[in-house]
Image: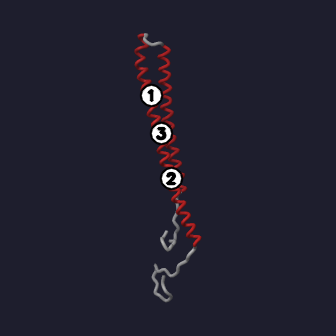
Amino acid sequence: MLRPGAEVQSDSIIMRLSNPELIQNLDAAATSLEQEKANLRRLILNNERDVLTEEAILAELSSNFQVMKLRREAEDELITSGVISQLTYQTTILRQKQMKKRVDLQKQHINHLKKVAVESELIQKSRSTWRKPNCKVFNSERVA
């Protein structure tokens, strides 16, 4: 800070004003921003975990569907020779169709989950958007 009568420049500090309430509000806002950023990171990690869990379920369902498909293909030959009953063959066909439907539904579920994750992340990001003030706030320790 300059003394009275000193020559000043355009960037010279001629006076310091202090507003403890403003500094406290700024610190609270910065803390709140950090908390919102942490919440966003947690949300992203949880969303990724949820998607991975559902993809693991899809992998298991897909595997089961492939087993049913192979079983039906094997029974295609056995039904014509009379080795298995019509009931057993029709049950296999039904199970294969059901498994295919479960795989398709799981894929839809994953796609929906991804859309919900993106939307929830956008909402959280909008909550953690912080606009810096147009002026600089000087503190004895930092400039914000």
Q: Secondary structure at mark 2?
A: helix
Seen at 48% across and 16% down, the residue is: 88
- With respect to residue 71, does 80 lie above or below? above
x and y percentages locating residue 22 in the rendered image: 57, 70
Q: Secondary structure at mark 1?
A: helix
Tell me if 21 is positioned left or right of 142 in this view.
Answer: right
- Residue 100 numbered mark, or none: none
Please state which amino acid type lies under the numbered disc 1: Asn
Q: How is the image coloured?
A: secondary structure
x and y percentages locating residue 45 in the rendered image: 47, 48
Please state which amino acid type lies under the numbered disc 3: Thr
Kindly identify which residue carries mark 1.
64
Seen at 47% across and 39% down, the residue is: 53
Kindly identify which residue carries mark 3.
53
Depth order, front residue of 53/15: 53
Q: Along the polypeptide, which appears first: circle 2 or circle 3?
A: 2
Q: Along the polypeptide, which appears first: circle 1 or circle 2?
A: 2
Depth order, front residue of 10/142: 142
x and y percentages locating residue 132 in the rendered image: 51, 65
Q: Secondary structure at mark 3?
A: helix
- With respect to residue 64, does 132 lie above or below? below
- With respect to residue 36, does 116 lie above or below? above
- With respect to residue 87, does 111 lie above or below? below
Seen at 55% across and 70% down, the residue is: 23
- Residue 40 numbered mark, or none: 2
Q: Are marks 3 and 1 in contact (CB under 8 Å)?
A: no
Badge 2: how crowded within 10 Å, few (<14), some, or many (20+)?
Answer: many
x and y percentages locating residue 20 in the rendered image: 57, 72
Please state which amino acid type lies under the numbered disc 2: Leu
Q: In whole angstroms, how far apart are the C-alphas of marks 3 and 1?
A: 17 Å
